Image (cartoon, helix red, strand yellow):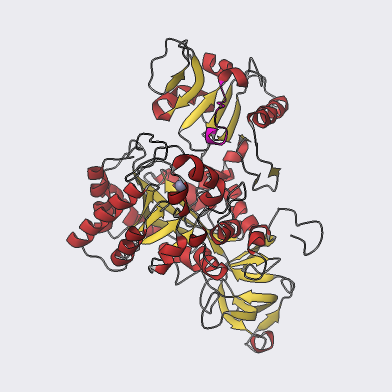
């Protein structure tokens, strides 16, 4: 008989309403046997005491219901984004607060490159942070006049090149591809907008796509989970599942030793050419479900519907963008969306739909209502993911239709200032990522990072939903703040629910997987502004221990 290991802690927060706190967790194999008083748990047959977490706070392992496995690969390129980030290897990357910072960061990276021919690859740029200034090829030529420089913007929809890179890719005044930006004199500026133009720069990143999923990327992604207390990750939109080699990649890497559970969603529509028809893809997903393990889950689908608000490509209802910019773009036509949604729904697949703008949420709801009327299905848990501009009326409808909302709380912080001042204006910004309204109307919610778009870190995500503070320190919509208990529930049981895994994970209770985040402080006790900086010692996943490689603060107990 396997031993029952009893882990006493300074505090155990279970998220089980019947036993909200405890002294210790008893684990047998990969499952929780019991939670309660240490003395009581030690009376179970075969109980052994393990005091390694005696000074820590144990909470359910966090569930990130919208992330990307390719985020493990981006650190092979140089980071030039605005906010500070910590790579999975523990290295701290300060944010670049100005174009000058970006140039300095790139110059430093350039001198480190050994191969004189290799292009310098970078990621994370967002011009919306630098209004009035636009990083051009000429500015980038200060980094190198001879080495190609290739920067992928944080949106993933734009690339900026230096002059050497444009020469290497044959881009000049005669290039007529749509999306190649040119100045008044007809000279290309270095910016390649959207996919047709970006393809011209593709030779520079050949064989090393920014978001490539490979064994090293998956290992880094898993370690990012450990560093942030995240025990269940998603790859929300994989293009690898329609062929056997892709499935094998996940199966060989996400084994018992992998430090997180991974739920891989197939990218069903809106991302270019696909090999299989919708019904073939749906059938394949149903079959792939049979290959799922305790650690690795297949069989769900993500559908893409619009672009991003800060990129002005999200679809908005009246009155549209704050500065009257043209409305955004549908990733697929409403008819194609209906066909895809209906096909996967009828096959019994769980569907998460990318909806940034409120017109997109509207189309999601109209389509869901039509599909459910034609093909009723109990407990579908189809999810509006991002749900950034969903209105009160839309949340009421979500509740009626049984939909969930995965809310992009990190946006409040990362782009909140831009939403108030530039994209939608202060009144609609105040109701963006409206977690309080969603909960008030009974919509099941989770909160997410969409890493690499914003950093993985559910404690930070929780903090953003509780404080609604922006990068500049303003509060964006005080009335949509939620309590710390509600936010902690959203990043544990909430994420588990919309992955249909809440019977297995999301709380610490007998019979569930022994998945825990090991914290230095109690997220319900520290001041709200400090929730994000609570040190994470590591995780327990199915009873196995994983240690963070992010340095603890110098003073014990300091945050
Ligand atoms: Zn995403």
- Compared with residue 98, is residue 39 higher up or lower down, i.e. above or below? below
If the image is split into quadrants, where does the N terminus sit?
A: bottom right
- Percent across and percent down for residue 201 are 49, 23
From the viewer's perspective, tell me whether residue 341 is left or right of residue 373. Answer: right
Magenta residues span 127-136
Vertical position of residue 177 compared to residue 315: above or below: above
Say if 293 sits above or below 308 in the image: below
Spot occupied by residue 43 in the image (x, y as percentages of width and height): 65, 89
**Where, quadrant-wise, is the C terminus in this rendering?**
bottom right
Assign the magenta stretch its main secondary structure. Answer: loop
Task: Indicate left or right for 153 with 111 as reference.
Answer: left
Q: Is residue 396 among what the camera can see?
A: yes
In the displayed orientation, state which residue is furthest to the front.
427
- Identify which residue, 176 or 480, lies in the foreground: 480
Is residue 238 highlighted in magenta? no
Q: Nearer the viewer, residue 126 or 197?
A: 126
Front one among 182 and 325: 325
Q: Is residue 177 above or below residue 258?
A: above
Q: Is residue 1 visible?
A: no
Which residue is most to the right?
555
Question: Residue at (57%, 39%) from the top-left corner?
Answer: 74
Q: Is residue 531 left or right of residue 401?
A: right
Q: Which quadrant of the view contains residue 229?
A: bottom right
Q: How many marks?
A: 0
Residue 64 is situated, as x and y percent measured from the top left of the image, at 51, 57
Give how far across and how far down residue 450 sits, in percent. Answer: 50, 49
Q: Residue furthest left?
A: 374
């Amino acid at each position: 008989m396997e031993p029952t290991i009893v882990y006493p802690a300074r505090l155990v927060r279970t998220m089980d309403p019947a036993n909200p706190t405890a002294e210790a967790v008893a684990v047998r194999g990969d499952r929780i046997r019991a939670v309660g008083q240490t003395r009581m748990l030690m009376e179970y047959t075969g109980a052994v005491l393990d005091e390694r977490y005696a000074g820590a706070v144990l909470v359910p392992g966090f569930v990130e219901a919208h992330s990307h496995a390719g985020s493990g690969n981006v650190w092979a390129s140089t980071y030039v984004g605005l906010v500070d980030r910590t790579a999975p290897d523990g290295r701290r990357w300060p944010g670049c607060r100005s174009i000058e910072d970006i140039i300095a960061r790139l110059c430093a990276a350039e001198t480190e490159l050994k191969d004189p021919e290799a292009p310098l690859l970078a990621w994370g740029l967002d011009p919306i942070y630098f209004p009035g200034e636009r990083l051009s090829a000429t500015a980038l030529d200060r980094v190198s006049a001879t080495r190609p420089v290739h920067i992928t913007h944080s949106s993933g929809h734009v690339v900026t090149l230096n002059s050497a890179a444009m020469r290497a890719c044959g881009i000049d005044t005669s290039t007529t591809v749509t999306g190649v930006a040119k100045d008044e004199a007809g000279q290309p500026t270095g910016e390649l907008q959207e996919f047709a133009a970006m393809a011209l720069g593709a030779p520079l990143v050949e064989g090393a796509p920014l978001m490539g999923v490979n064994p090293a990327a998956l290992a880094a992604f898993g370690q990012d989970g450990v560093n942030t207390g995240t025990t269940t990750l998603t790859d929300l939109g994989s293009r690898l599942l329609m062929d056997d080699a892709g499935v094998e990649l996940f199966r060989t890497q996400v084994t018992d030793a992998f430090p997180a559970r991974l739920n891989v969603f197939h990218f069903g529509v809106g991302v270019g050419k696909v090999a299989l028809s919708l019904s073939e893809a749906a059938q394949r997903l149903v079959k792939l479900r049979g290959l799922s393990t305790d650690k690795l889950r297949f069989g769900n689908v993500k559908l893409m519907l619009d672009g991003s608000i800060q990129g002005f490509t999200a679809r908005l209802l009246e009155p549209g963008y704050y500065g009257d910019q043209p409305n955004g773009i549908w990733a697929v036509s409403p008819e194609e969306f209906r066909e895809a949604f209906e096909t996967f729904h009828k096959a019994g697949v769980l569907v998460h739909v990318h909806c940034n703008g409120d017109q997109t949420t509207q189309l999601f709801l109209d389509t869901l209502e039509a599909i459910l009327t034609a093909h009723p299905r109990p407990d579908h848990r189809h999810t509006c993911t991002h749900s950034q501009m969903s209105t009160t009326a839309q949340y009421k409808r979500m509740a009626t239709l049984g939909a969930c909302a995965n809310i992009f709380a990190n946006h409040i912080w990362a782009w909140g200032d831009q939403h108030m001042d530039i994209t939608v204006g202060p009144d609609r910004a105040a109701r963006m990522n409206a977690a309080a309204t969603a909960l008030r109307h009974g919509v099941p919610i989770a909160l997410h990072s969409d890493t690499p778009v914003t950093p993985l870190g559910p404690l930070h995500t929780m903090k953003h939903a509780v404080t609604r503070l922006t990068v500049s320190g303003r509060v964006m919509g005080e009335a949509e703040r939620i309590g710390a208990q509600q936010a902690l529930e959203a990043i544990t049981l909430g994420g588990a629910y919309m992955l249909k895994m809440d019977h297995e994970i999301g709380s610490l209770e007998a019979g569930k997987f022994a998945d825990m985040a090991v914290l230095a402080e109690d997220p319900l006790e520290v001041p709200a502004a400090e929730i994000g900086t609570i040190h994470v010692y590591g995780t327990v996943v199915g009873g196995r221990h994983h240690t963070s490689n992010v340095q603890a603060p110098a003073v014990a107990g300091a945050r």
